[in-house]
Image (cartoon, coloured by chain):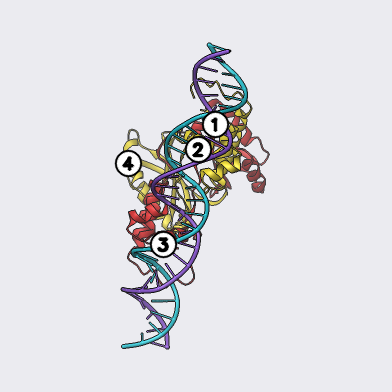
Chain colours: A red, B yellow, C purple, D cyan
Amino acid sequence: MTIDELDGRIIVLLAREPRIGVLEMSRRLGVARGTAQARLDRLQSNGVIRGFGPQVNPAALGYPVTAFATLQIRQGQGPDVRAHLASVPEVLELHTTTGSGDMLCRLVARSNADLQRVIDRVVGFDGIDRAATAIVMENPVPLRIIPLVEQAASEHGDRTRTGEPDG
Amino acid sequence: MTIDELDGRIIVLLAREPRIGVLEMSRRLGVARGTAQARLDRLQSNGVIRGFGPQVNPAALGYPVTAFATLQIRQGQGPDVRAHLASVPEVLELHTTTGSGDMLCRLVARSNADLQRVIDRVVGFDGIDRAATAIVMENPVPLRIIPLVEQAASEHGDRTRTGEPDG
DNA sequence: CTCCAGCTGAGCAGAGTGTCCAGCTCCCGC
DNA sequence: GCGGGAGCTGGACACTCTGCTCAGCTGGAG
């Protein structure tokens, strides 16, 4: 899957002003509404755009502390540990990574003291041997996608776009 | 800032079906449209809901490899390093964390081989002493917020809802 | 009791959406 | 050179939703 320059502009525009509709989008892009609509449909069915869910700020919910925990998992306990972690609301994200059978998870908590409770709950499970936690102090680059989209779009903007085998 | 049970249902509903409008939302929630609209406005102005940007899948853009890099920063080089990392499109996220003046960043790349190029670019900067990279193999829990919202909402759902001191 | 805040149900004009359509251009293969 | 397919254009239609306003109701606080 590659995106061209128009696709890139659509995504960037949506990222900057999510509330605009297809009509306004087509005006900004200088294309017909049908074109904008078709491109957007294609981006969504391709899975490039997964959806437009609300971006919730955990801090505003009362969870201002973020941390990353690296977990050491006992051999063969992976599936159980995943299920355990998935059941903890404060676990926002979980990855299995290279390294000695490790996992990396993103946690939030109500305070530094509350983080202890969360970690206790996370590691209070038989398959987890050890946890190393790093508390986030600052977030100089919040989760972003625009620069990557611009790069991906510019790399294919002037290439052939037809002749795709199947899609 | 706390949210009540209705606020929680609004967020969960939006997370599950982002395309629905205020009118449809009010029907599902069993409240008047004005109420749903007022609640949603409040959630947005409170910063609980930051926006409705498109959720872009880097893999569909041609960047299927995700990694987390822990960076050792030389004393006093923090600001420069941040600017450097912010200029790299493949750096999707950057945090400063506790530990010996470290940073944690999320990277994507076109392949494992391409990851080497990205890491070279990331660490090819004077203020960075060392980088430890963990490649993501699987993502058992993708970034999620619903369980946390439900917890935050249930904790306040049956409490007094009026008489909040300030908000 | 009175005041205040929040919710309700209703109405209105305006804008956007989903969905057609015909026509055009470009590129491909024959 | 010619026909076909894909994509874009500009327009049209009915329908729905939005933003905004209003009066009335309810429950808690002073």
Q: How dense is the environment of label 3, judged by Cα within 10 Å: few (below 14), some, or many (20 and up)?
A: few
Residue A148 visible? The answer is: no
Chain at tag 1: A
Badge 1, how many Cα within 10 Å: few under 14, some, many 20+? many
Please say if D8 is above or below A124.
Answer: below
Residue B42 visible to an observer of this rendering: yes
| Residue type pointed to by label 3 | Gly
Q: Which amino acid is tagged 2?
A: Gln
Q: Residues within 10 Å of mark 2 (few under 14, many from 20)?
A: some
Of helix, strand and loop, which one carries label 3?
helix
Q: Residues within 10 Å of mark 4 (few under 14, many from 20)?
A: few
- Residue D26 is drawn in which quadrant? top right
Looking at the image, is mark 4 or mark 2 earlier in the sequence? 2
Q: Amino acid at mark 1?
A: Ala
User: Circle 1 is placed at which residue position?
Assistant: A109
On screen, residue B32 above or below A151: above
Percent coordinates x, y for residue B134 in the rendering: 49, 48
Nearer mark to the viewer, of 1 and 4: 1
